[in-house]
Image (cartoon, rainbow, N blue to C red):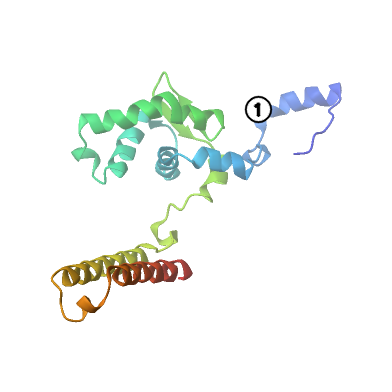
Amino acid sequence: MKSTHISSEQQGEVDMGDETDSPADEPAFSKDEIFHLLQNERRRMVLRYLRGTEGPVRMRDIAEQVAAWEHDTTVQELTSTQRQRVYIPLYQSHLSKLDTAGIIDYQQNRGIVVRKPLADQIDQYLQIDPSAEPTTEPSDSNWDDYYISATVLCYILLIGAVIELPFLSLLSGIALSASILLLFTVLTISRLIN
């Protein structure tokens, strides 16, 4: 950030203009500050919830929706314990941090939260739209299948060696161990390359 010296005459002008500043005049966040704010999943969920709102929102509504997302359920199906485990940290910590950063206006005594224009700077770092998120699940599940298959194959080889099947009885314990280790090494390297 550049520092600029302001004369006493200009200081009076700046002070009067503070109330009419546009959102574009608000300070930009550094990436470190943004990542620090977004390091907690609950804060990300709060911003996700507030993205589609205008005006004041009850803190309780935010806490219930965040709890529902965390437990992969609906707000109606939440237990009071699930609600409380989310409500308390939001009330005591997370909303205050977002308020201090100027992203939201959190009126703790009234239980009201309002999204501020500064939150628009943060939105680009949130992958809120499911279509915008990288599709890693299918490939991850494929790799899970490969590892499960390799594990099953290794158990078959071990059991076959124990009951002395013809081909497997030719392998020593060290050769069998090396074969299993080689199989998992190849799988792991293949996964890292892809």
Disc 1 packing (10 Å; few <14; some 14–19; many ≥20): few
83 sits to left or right of 128: left
- Residue displayed at 48% across by 70% down: 193
Above or below: residue 57 compared with residue 32: above
Q: Considering the image in quadrants, where does the C terminus appear?
A: bottom left
Above or below: residue 89 compared with residue 167: above
Residue 175: x and y, percent? Answer: 32, 72
Depth check, front residue: 151 or 145: 151
81 sits to left or right of 62: left
Depth check, front residue: 68 or 162: 162
Amino acid type of the residue that numbered disc 1 sits on in the rendered structure: Glu
Which residue corresponds to mark 1? 19
Residue 86: x and y, percent? Answer: 33, 32
- Residue displayed at 40% across by 64% down: 135
Residue 13: x and y, percent? Answer: 78, 26
Task: Using the rendered image of the protein, determine whether residue 80 is visible from the camera's viewpoint.
Answer: yes
Q: Residue furthest top?
A: 109
